[in-house]
Amino acid sequence: MTESATFVYDDECGFCTWCAQRLIDHSELAVIGFSDLDDEQRERLPDDWREGAHLITDEQVYSFGEAIEQAFERSDLAPPKSDETLDFLRQFSDYNRLRERLYREAADRRALWGKFARQETPVRRN
């Protein structure tokens, strides 16, 4: 995947910031927090954009679990051939529902995850 992409996260959340730092360390993604969004970026996001992470590309916006999946796939954290596995799984609506449910389960417990992994200073890479 060579198109430019920007990962957008809640930079007031220590756990989210810790996750964003992992993307900076392991990908070429641009990474910005909610507080750094410009009007054009904000307009492209869904109405409930403050409820989770997003990945903005030239052509599309991925939100929540799909955003995390897309960011993971664009990082060196993804194992070889993971794109083939994900392409296969994406064929099934149950997979998409499961991915979003797991994302929501994790996102709704950010304070708990932040007890184990957090970073106080927001990160950004343009």
Image (cartoon, rainbow, N blue to C red):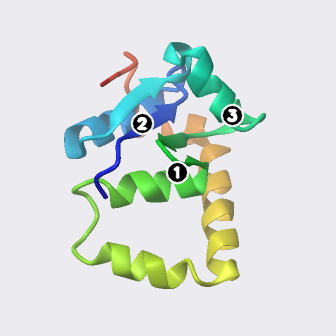
User: 114 or 74: which is nearer to us?
Assistant: 74
Name the residue furthest right: 47
Label 2, secondary structure: give it. strand
x and y percent of residue 28 in the render? Answer: 24, 41
Side (left or right) of 109 relative to 74: right
Up the image or down, 89 lies above or below 51; here it is below
Disc 3: CA contacts within 10 A as few (<14), some (14-19) or many (>=20): some
Q: Position of residue 124 (x, y in %)?
A: 35, 22
N-term-proximal mark, 3 vs 2: 2
Q: Quadrant of residue 118?
A: top left
Numbered disc 1: secondary structure:
helix
Q: Describe the element under mark 3 as helix, strand or loop.
A: helix
Crowding at label 1, few (<14), some or many (≥20) Cα neighbours within 10 Å? many
Query: Of discs 3 and 2, which sits in the foreground?
Result: 2
What residue is shown with label 1?
A: 67
Please give the label number shown on residue 6. Answer: 2
Q: Against 69, is 41 above or below? A: above
Between the C-alphas of marks 1 and 2, the distance is: 10 Å
- Left or right placement of residue 106 versus residue 11 in this view: right
Point out the image quarter for the C terminus: top left
Q: Which mark is residue 49?
A: 3
For the question of whether residue 117 can be seen, the reply is no
The residue positioned 63% from the left and 24% from the top of the image is 42
Gap in Å between the C-alphas at discs 3 and 1? 12 Å
Q: Position of residue 14 (x, y in %)?
A: 47, 26
